[in-house]
């Protein structure tokens, strides 16, 4: 039986505001999963708190909606325990770059084979319009009535510095690009981040029309294995670029742990030791 | 044989003290290992400074020809490397006890009722090797002479310990050991106890620390995933598991903090694995929000809190039983969890297995509360017999799963939804009797569900209506009610006289000290009933009321300031106990507890007299 998009939808209808960019991101993700023909029961989706944190509710998968900022480490445990499953993480700029920002570097260093869909609307939407790490300087929000004074986080260079093994940026209005990038990200062995700009219609810090004009696809000649070039393109602002900025191959956590197992059981014909053998090791 | 009437022919306590980095702990551990190879039992207690070097560090070793329940009270032998160690411990020496000291570094009080033997540990080490580092091995030699320890055995232990550093180092250590023996001979050490004979009658015993026992219990229970963050004094559990996991086909990861550690084990549990994270108070505190989440999404996880002195950074290397209230009630909202407190090194193994059985069957977090004293305590324990280990079937009712003991170990796993339950599958189906719902794991077609920290319906959808919150709160707590009913049917956890007016209650690592205090009291004609529950939340309430029946006075012993378990008992059973607290960072002794019992016995006596 051929799967359809319907197979990747849960029986819960999305509750985002009409016109929210997240609808497009969700649809792109479902299209990518369908294109890759991944059985829903082999997908683990973990999301944090926030509007985009609701992703797990709307996907037909083993879905986990945890606490604010902790989606990544939760997903690390799930992937490590069940390496055959496709593990997706979804969340927003507040969840992933604010409260949970500290978890990105360790997961990048372990190169855990998961795909992180990080959706940035440059504002805290669910709590109704406060400043986030990517709200531009000067923006007036409910927690910055006289304008934001903190410098805006340059997101892509941070991921590059962490050496995340797959880094891409897209915009929620470009369905084709999002779907292609997501397929590439899910197929990538190791940590992949798909960073998507997605405007909030209720607290429009990022405006849909401006966003569409602001972003241009990376030139065809662009080489995503060149890190210094990636830094340069990531810092460009006129125009800003979208596409796959960086992709390299390095051992995943799963591969490292398999290799640990080989080393630890070398004297036991690569078979796990029994409980009895372990106990006797202490006698 | 009756424990109370058992007369020891051999029972003594040694304390080795010095500066952190002097090697006092390794000196004591080597001696303890040698003693463990004789027909005797061994029990150690370690306290050391939080710094790598400097500060007072000591190891206490009790050797006995019969089961040892506690580290004992006063010390028979004192080996002190410096003045600080002498000043710290001399008041713990029994009258007439023996002090071996380094005369170049320790000034003694000659008027004390003690036997003093000066052995220039540092000078001997410097003369032999040019450095001070070997003084602990000189001390070990002196102990060897004092107790007539088989020299070959000590040679082997030294080789095992220093062999990796090369033959030169081993040779040096053997010379230092010999110097210790000679110095002991020259001093004509009075020999009271002999540890001469090595025996293989104890081949089924091993020397194990409480921390190691927890790690081994997890492996035996089938746990194959650990995530952790180093924290004193729980680190040895994490290190042991990190070493063992790849060997048994499990996985261990070190993560960035305790929040990530508990998140990872929740994620791994969601994926179907039995999981554990070891930590101490500060780490447990950080885990609060995620602990709550595990209760809400009903996933089994096991957390070990090796308690240390608090609050704040507190006393990282010292012991305290002060995380109980946080473990039971801590975190916002009301989230069910199970608390287990093992009572001895051996019990750490079996209660850890029990923790996994309960977590998996009741689908909620289990917190194992140990402490620094039991975590670092080493004791001779019987090697668990794996032929007594069986996996219980999915259909086996939770109430029929035995409490793990040396005689029988049943290993339970989560009851995965069967095909009937997968029809119109509801992950959080409200079972009116048990509250326990069928669970699925990723990879099972048709078992997909949403686990959300938001309040949710039986089929996992977010829902904040009054009806649903009421229903699901009851459902989650019904699991604890069910467990409590099962505990009522488990073997009783109190012992001692049934015809007495005095009861004594403790929890966790103090069991042995309380038991010995009871033995002392009973020898003096004071009858006591002792209760020491292992699962301390929930409690089997009928059974505890049965224990309390007829008692005039109840003593609660615990190592904290505020009386956390006493509050719990008061609130649940309406009794007003007499509380014995110790909050010095060191374990309570049988004598200290006995002193309390004696006072209570007088009160009870007076009450009786008044009534006449």
Image: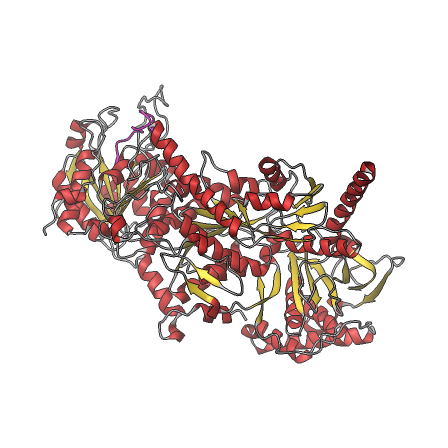
In the rendered view, would you say A144 is above or below B46?
Answer: above
Q: Taking the image as drawn, is residue B457 in sight?
A: yes
Between residues B506 and A233, which one lies in front from this camera angle? B506
Give how far across and how far down residue B419 sits, in percent. Answer: 25, 53
Residue A127 lies in the magenta-colored region: yes
A142 in magenta: no
Locate residue B179: give its quadrant.
Answer: bottom right
- Furthest-front residue in this view: B612
Q: As rendered, which of A134 and B453 lies closer to the eye?
A: B453
- Residue projecting furthest to the bottom: B152
Residue A171 visible in image: no
Residue at figure coordinates x 71%, y 71% from the top left: B138
Indicate how the structure is coloured in the image. Answer: secondary structure
Query: Magenta span covers which residues?
Result: A119-131
Instruction: Give percent across and percent down for residue A163.
Output: 31, 50
Magenta-drawn stretch, dominant element (helix, strand or loop)? loop
Image point (69%, 79%), residue name: B197
Q: Residue at x 70, y 53 (%)?
A: B497
Tell which of A215 and B2 is nearer to you: B2
Left or right position of B596 against B233: right
Q: Quadrant of the N terminus of chain B?
A: bottom right
**A93 relative position to B215: left or right:** left
Residue B202 figure quarter: bottom right
Asked whether B462 or B549 is in front, the reply is B549
Rendered-image quadrant of the C terminus of chain B = top right
Task: State whether residue B426 is above or below residue A253.
Answer: above
| Left or right of B120 on screen, residue A121 | left
> Residue A210: where, in percent of width, then height?
18, 28
Residue B365 drawn above or below residue B142: above
């Amino acid at each position: 039986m051929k799967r359809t998009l319907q197979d990747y939808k849960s029986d819960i209808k999305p509750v985002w505001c009409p016109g929210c960019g997240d609808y497009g991101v969700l649809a792109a993700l479902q299209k990518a999963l369908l294109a890759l023909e991944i059985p829903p029961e082999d997908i683990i989706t973990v999301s944090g708190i926030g509007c985009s944190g609701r992703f797990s509710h709307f996907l037909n998968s083993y879905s986990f909606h945890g606490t604010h900022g902790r989606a990544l480490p939760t997903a690390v445990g799930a992937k490590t325990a069940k390496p055959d499953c496709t593990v997706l993480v979804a969340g927003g700029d507040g969840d992933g770059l604010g409260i949970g920002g500290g978890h990105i570097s360790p997961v990048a260093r372990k190169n855990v084979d998961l795909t992180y869909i990080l959706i940035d609307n440059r504002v805290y939407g669910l709590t109704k319009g406060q400043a986030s790490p990517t709200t531009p300087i000067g923006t007036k929000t409910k927690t910055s009535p006289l304008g934001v004074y903190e410098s805006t986080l340059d997101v892509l260079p941070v991921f590059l510095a962490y050496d995340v093994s797959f880094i891409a940026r897209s915009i929620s209005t470009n369905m084709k690009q999002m779907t292609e990038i997501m397929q590439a990200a899910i197929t990538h062995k190791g940590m992949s981040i798909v960073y998507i700009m997605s405007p909030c219609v209720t607290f429009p810090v990022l405006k849909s029309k401006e966003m569409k004009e602001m972003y241009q696809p990376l030139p065809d000649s662009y080489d995503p294995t060149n890190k210094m070039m990636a830094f340069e393109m990531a810092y460009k602002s006129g125009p800003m670029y979208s596409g796959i900025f960086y992709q390299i191959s390095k051992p995943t956590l799963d591969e490292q742990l398999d290799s640990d197992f080989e080393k630890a059981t070398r004297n036991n014909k690569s078979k796990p030791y029994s409980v009895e053998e372990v106990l006797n090791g202490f006698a | 044989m009756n424990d109370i009437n058992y007369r020891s022919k051999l029972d003594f306590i040694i304390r080795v003290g010095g500066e952190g980095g002097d090697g006092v702990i390794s000196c004591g551990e080597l001696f303890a290992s040698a003693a463990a190879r004789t027909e005797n039992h061994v029990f150690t207690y370690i306290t050391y400074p939080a710094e790598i070097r400097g500060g007072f560090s000591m190891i206490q070793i009790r050797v006995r020809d019969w089961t040892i329940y506690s580290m004992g009270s006063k010390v028979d032998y004192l080996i002190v490397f410096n003045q600080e160690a002498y000043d710290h411990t001399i008041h713990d020496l029994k009258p007439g006890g023996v002090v071996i000291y380094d005369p170049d570094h320790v000034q003694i009080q000659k008027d004390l009722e003690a036997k003093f033997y000066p052995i220039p540990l540092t000078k001997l080490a410097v003369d032999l090797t040019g450095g001070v580092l070997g003084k602990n091995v000189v001390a070990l030699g002196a102990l060897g002479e004092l107790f007539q320890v088989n020299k070959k055995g000590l040679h082997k232990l030294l080789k095992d310990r220093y062999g990796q550093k090369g033959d030169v180092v081993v040779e040096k250590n053997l010379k230092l050991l010999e110097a210790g023996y000679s110095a002991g001979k020259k001093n004509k050490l009075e020999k009271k106890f002999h540890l001469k004979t090595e025996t293989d009658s104890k081949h089924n015993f091993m020397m194990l620390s409480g921390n190691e026992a927890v790690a081994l219990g997890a492996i035996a229970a089938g746990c194959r995933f650990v995530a952790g963050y180093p924290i004193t004094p729980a680190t040895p559990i994490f290190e042991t598991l990190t070493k063992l996991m790849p060997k048994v086909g499990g996985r261990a990861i070190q993560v960035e903090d305790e929040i990530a550690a508990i998140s990872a084990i929740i994620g791994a549990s969601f994926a179907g694995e039995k999981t554990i994270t070891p930590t101490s108070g500060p780490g447990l505190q950080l885990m609060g929000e995620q602990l709550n989440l595990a209760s809400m999404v009903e996933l089994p996880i096991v957390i070990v809190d090796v308690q240390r002195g608090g609050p704040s950074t507190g006393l990282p290397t010292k012991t305290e039983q002060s995380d109980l209230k946080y473990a039971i009630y801590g975190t916002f909202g009301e989230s069910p969890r199970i608390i287990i407190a093992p009572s001895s090194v051996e019990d750490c193994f079996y209660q850890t297995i029990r923790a996994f059985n309960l977590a998996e069957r009741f689908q909620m977090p289990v917190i194992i509360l140990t402490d620094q004293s039991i975590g670092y305590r080493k004791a001779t324990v019987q090697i668990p017999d794996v032929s007594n280990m069986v996996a219980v079937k999915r259909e086996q009712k939770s109430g029929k799963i035995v409490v793990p003991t040396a005689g029988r170990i049943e290993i339970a796993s989560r009851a995965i939804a069967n095909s009937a339950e997968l029809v119109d599958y509801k992950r959080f189906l409200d079972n009116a009797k048990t509250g326990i719902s069928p669970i699925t794991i990723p990879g099972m077609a048709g078992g997909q569900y949403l686990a959300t920290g938001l309040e949710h319906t039986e089929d996992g959808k977010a829902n904040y209506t009054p009806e649903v919150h009421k229903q699901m709160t009851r459902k989650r707590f019904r699991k604890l009610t069910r467990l409590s009913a099962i505990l009522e049917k488990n073997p009783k956890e109190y012992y001692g006289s049934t015809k007495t007016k005095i009861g004594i209650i403790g929890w966790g690592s103090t069991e042995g000290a309380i038991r010995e205090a009871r033995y002392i009291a009973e020898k003096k004609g004071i009858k006591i009933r002792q209760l020491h529950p292992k699962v301390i939340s929930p409690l089997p309430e009928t059974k505890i009321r049965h224990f309390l029946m007829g008692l005039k006075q109840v003593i609660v012993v615990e190592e904290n300031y505020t009386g956390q378990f006493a509050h719990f008992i008061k609130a649940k059973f309406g009794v007003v106990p007499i509380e014995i607290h110790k909050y010095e960072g060191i374990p309570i002794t049988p004598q200290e507890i006995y002193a309390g019992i004696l006072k209570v016995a007088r009160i009870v006596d007076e009450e009786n007299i008044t009534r006449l």
